[in-house]
Every structure is written in structure tokens, then in C-alpha cells.
Amino acid sequence: MAALWRGRHRWKRTNCLHVLTRNLTGKYDYDLVVIGGGSGGLACSKEAAQLGQKVAVLDHVEPSVKGTKWGLGGTCVNVGCIPKKLMHQAALLGTAVKDAKKFGWQISEPICHDWSTMADAVQNHVRSLNWGHRVQLQDKKVKYLNIKGSLLDEHTVKGLTKAGKETILTAKNIVIATGGRPKYPTNIPGAMEHGITSDDIFWLKKSPGKTLVVGASYVALECAGFLTGIGLDTTVMVRSIALRGFDQQMAGLVTDYMEAYGTKFAWQCVPKRVDKLSSGVLQVTWMDNNTGNEHKDTYDSVLWAVGRAPETKALGLDKLGVQLDKETGKIVVGADESTSVPNIYAFGDIGEGRPELTPTAIKAGKLLARRLARHSAELMNYDSVPTTVFTPLEYGCVGLSEEEAEKRLGKDGIEVYHAFYKPLEFTVAERDASQCYLKVICERDGDQKILGLHFTGPNAGEVTQGFALAFQCGATYSHLLQTVGIHPTCAEELTKVNITKRSGLDATVTGC
């Protein structure tokens, strides 16, 4: 019987009952089945196939509450990083047009933005990426199945097509990479009925018009930033603080710049209800927690950016005993991305405690595939992961926030070098650079190892990516000073930073 139990499982429908039959060969349909066709799932499946594994990847997108749906590639490609960065670029171009006049470009007025032109271009690019992912899977001999997957046991996945047809797949190992979806508040009447989320904003055919963005995460601020940048009346409603989990001094600079840029903020405010008026506009009622007063205003769109929920509910994890975090609903995983059930792994946004970032999911997926194929034992290093918030003034960081560094080492255990600088591009354009700032957080003693690096300014992502490499090499403050800067760049200012917060001296950079 033991030999039979180790054999291949296959489910067959007989008289409306599922009967378990076992194949005596001891093999499975696949070496690896990946549930989830986002950045991480695709990277894992392609890497495994390259290493000689027989792989299938299942991807199914439930339409958003508003009916928005998309193709292969997950959040990043369809409703995240890619369309977000392109719309951010659209907003930056609007600012560049204004700057251009100061540089001698003769531009006739009025200058206006057309949403449909931008949206069509962005959506066409996304569709090209959807197609490209399908081609890559085919080229790498990964079986792509556009079906909804759930688990029957540690080696068996049930797939369900839109028409309700079942497909059963067995695998030596199963990987869950289903990510998450935006949440709607459940206690606000009209929120779901009248609001949209980031699952919808990038696929709108018409301009969202005057928009209220509820939330203060990077998603909220990025969306509010590009909406403001293309000329839309935009308000961000913040319950407590902006960019929770990020360095709060930097978060303040980001929102200060946004306010100067034209984005309105309703601080310490909580929405109470959303009603659609006969004119078609949305009336939002909210409470100002500072004063206790209730307010109302009308908007064309309300964008909820109040967090994301993991896509775990439809996977059948409870029946298998896969452990979930009670608070977040995410899958509890080990350092090797293993779950509480053998042969079932999870990574990316679905994993508890993992950064909700595309590059970490991609790298973790590749490393997991190599381990499962016995080609490597390397684990994913989640320390010092760089990231950038693509707000009008971009904010890039790697390592610890100042708050976290103080918490770990104490205020006297760290040294913070900082500088306010002015990008050369801002000078002729006469742009305010009050929020262009950088700081390097170091251990105070010894070699002054760098613990955190933070930068607000143009092209923050490009700047931070380069310095992130130094973190992997154990960079110290002396290493930074030994680095020759590229003149005249914003990144160069990091190699010259020499004023400490402790000194109390003016940190404003003067001259070259």
C-alpha cells in the first residue's frame, strides 16, 4: 500500500463523485506547477524549465469590482509598476514642457493633456507585454493554462476554466505566487459601489476628472502625483501618516513637494460615506479628526488605495493545513519559501513578511526554482532591498530608515550625514528645490558602516539602484567619500555629503 500511496494521483469524476485513482509509475504530470502568472510566478516557471524541469503555470484574473480585467503578467505589468511609471512619465513631461520655455523653447499656449491618447498608448504597451510573456513561456516550453487553480493535496492542483470545466494536474512540487489585490473599505457605504482602485485607474478610457484618493501608501501618492501632473484636480485623504514604513522625514519632504506641486491633502480625515448624486458626481462625506467636524465635497472619481489583500481564499489552503498569518491572511513561509505543508511553496506578495516588490519576487522565484531543481542551495536575501516611490519628486531608499536605525542602535549609536541640494536642471527653470534632500545613516563607531541611504530628487530610482550595490558589499562612509562623483549630477552629492545632523550646521550645498 505504501508504494501505491507514493504513486501518481489522478482524480476522475464518476457519478458526480470524485474517486482517487493512483498510477503505479510513481511519477507526476509535472515536476513543478506554479499557480500565479505574475512577475514572480513567471520567473520561477521559466527558470525551472531552463533547468530541465517539466513545468506548468496557471494564471487566472478575476475581474475587478468594476469589471476591469487584463492578460498574463500579473499586477506589475498590468495594473502596477509598468503603467504607473508610464503615467508618471506623462506627468514629468508636463513639467518639462513648462521648464522648456525657460530654456528657450517656443511653446504656444494653451498646453493641455488628453487622457485617452495616453491611456491608449499605455494600454497598447501593456498588451504587447502580455503577448510577450505568452511567447516566452512557449519558447521555454512552459505549459501555460489560463485557468483558476486550487489545491486538492500537496501534489494535486485542480484547474477550473471560465466555462466550469475541470482540469487535474499533479506535480512533485507546487508553488503559490498569486500576489494580492487592492482592498475596499468594508465599513463605508458606497465605497465599493462608487469607487475604483489601482486595478481600474490605468484602464480607464476616459479621464477620471476631479479625483479623491483615499490612502497614503506609495500607491496612493504615486497615483495622486501623476493625476495632478496631467492637470487634474486631485486630493489625497490621509487618516494618519504618509508612507507608513518609510523614513518619515523623507515622507514629509515628498508630501510637502506634492502640496507645492498642486496636490491637495486632507490630513487626519476619514471618509464616512460615498453617494452618487443625480448629476452623476460623487458626494463624499468625511470626518476631520482634528476638529471633529463633518465635511462634504463632490468628485468625479474616488480612488481607494487603502492596502492590498492576499489572494489566498480560493486556493483551498485551509483544507490542506497551510498556515496563514491570522492578521494579514498571508502564507507563513520559511527562509526557503516553504509553507507548513511539504512540497508546497509560496513567495512574493503572498508570503508573510516579504516585501511587496516585483524585483524581490522575480529573484526569489528564480532562486526557488534552482533549489527545487537541485541546482543551488542559495536563499533569497531580503535585507537592504532598494525601492523608489515614483511621486512627482521621486524618493529612493535602501537599508534602514532613521527611525529603525535609532530603534536598533540608539540615537547615540548612529551618525546621520545629510544635505539639501539643488539639481542643476532646476536652476535655469527656477524650480523650487526645497525638498531635494539626501541622507546617509551610518554606525557611529568603527568603520561607520552605512545602514541606510535616502534620496529625494530627479531620477531617484536610477540613483538608488547604483548605490544599492554598495550595500551588498558592506559599504562604509569612508567608501562613499573615496568614490569619485560624476559632475554635475544629483547622485554626485552623495559622494560629498559631510555635514552631520548632530553638528547642527546648515546642510545646504553651496557651489559645485
Image (cartoon, grey):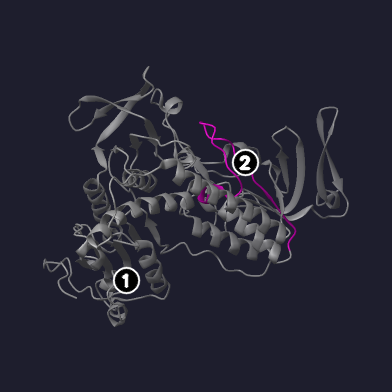
Point 66% across, 60% down: residue? 46
Q: Name the foreground residue: 68 vs 3.
A: 68
Label 1 sits on residue: 450
Quarter where residue 50 is shown: bottom right
Q: Name the foreground residue: 289 vs 342.
A: 289
Residue 427 shown left or right of residue 117 in the figure: left
Magenta segment main secondary structure: loop
Residue 391 in view in this figure: no
Instruction: Relative to 379, say whether 116 is above or below.
Output: above
Please state the horizontal and vertical placement of residue 364, each as a whole percent of the image: 55, 60
Please state the horizontal and vertical placement of residue 420, each as a whole percent of the image: 19, 64
Residue 170 in view in this figure: yes
Instruction: Relative to 28, say whether 481 is above or below.
Output: below
- Magenta segment includes 69: yes
Please state the horizontal and vertical placement of residue 500, each as a whole percent of the image: 18, 69
Please state the horizontal and vertical placement of residue 115, each as a whole percent of the image: 42, 41
Identity of the amino acid at label 2? Leu
Instruction: Relative to 509, say whether 214 is above or below.
Output: above
| SS at badge 1 | strand
Query: For the magenta stretch, what is the residue range?
Result: 53-77
